[in-house]
Amino acid sequence: MNQKRVYVSPLREQAAARTRAQILDRAAALFAERGYGRVTVADIAAAAGVASKTVFASVGSKGDILDRIVDAAVVESGYGDAVARVLTLRTPDEALRAVAHGTRAGNESQFRVHEAIHKALPVHENGEALWERATTAYRAALRTVAVHLHGLDEPPRHCVVEETADLLWFWFGPTGWRTLVVENGWPWGRAEDMLHRTAVATLY
């Protein structure tokens, strides 16, 4: 029995990928600006220049869209590369300076997504799962840094690994950056310098 061969047009696939990217980009901007609860699929469709049914067919529901945005941000944040660099450094000051710079780069480049997540948490249908989705890899990366710090010739004073990991999350996690940059209006560079100096002074 002959089977029909399914033909996939590369041009059509490229056009679909561009449409998905445009929808996700416009949705991220709207979520960050207005808040997840105040944005509808119709709003996203209008901003992306497509029909609402195209949004559903291309990327799914509003919740699916936010999940896709978060997953892409985790990949694009560069946390893995930043941690790999930290693990090559052998002095606490160098390592913590690299942590400050690497987490700044990730938070600054993904600022819009972080704002979208922050504004979504109070109204999202499953805010706890959203927060876990957004931060699990980030937090694990900082724990890896804590283990590295405790393996150096000069380990942190008065802290065990888990306490150091908690402090790194407190300083260099998304909430710490948002407190300084968004809520207090600090420039990214000033926040980076202060967080680095605070970490060194507290741990050493």
Image (tube, helix red, strand yellow):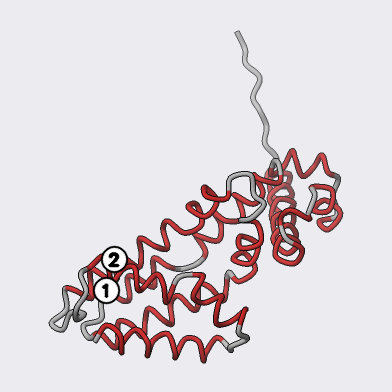
The image's mark for residue 87 is 1
Vertical arrangement, residue 173 with respect to residue 42, above or below: below
Front in this rendered view, residue 7 or 95: 95
Say whether residue 179 is left or right of residue 16: left
Tell me which label, 2 or 1, sits earlier in the chain: 1
Q: Amino acid at mark 1?
A: Leu
Say what amino acid the circle numbered 2 marks. Thr
Depth-wise, is mark 2 or mark 1 nearer the camera?
2
* Residue 173: numbered disc: none
In the rendering, which numbered label is found on residue 144?
2
Q: Position of residue 117 (x, y in %)?
A: 61, 60
Q: Image quarter for residue 147?
A: bottom left
Task: Decide: few, some or many residues near mark 1? Use Cα within 10 Å; few <14, some 14-19, many ≥20.
Answer: some
The quarter in which the C terminus is drawn is bottom left
Q: For the N terminus, which image quadrant?
A: top right
Residue 5 x, y percent position in the rendering = 64, 24
Q: Based on the displayed image, in which of its 4 quarters is residue 99 positioned?
A: bottom left
Q: How many angstroms separate mark 2 from mark 1 (CA)?
A: 9 Å
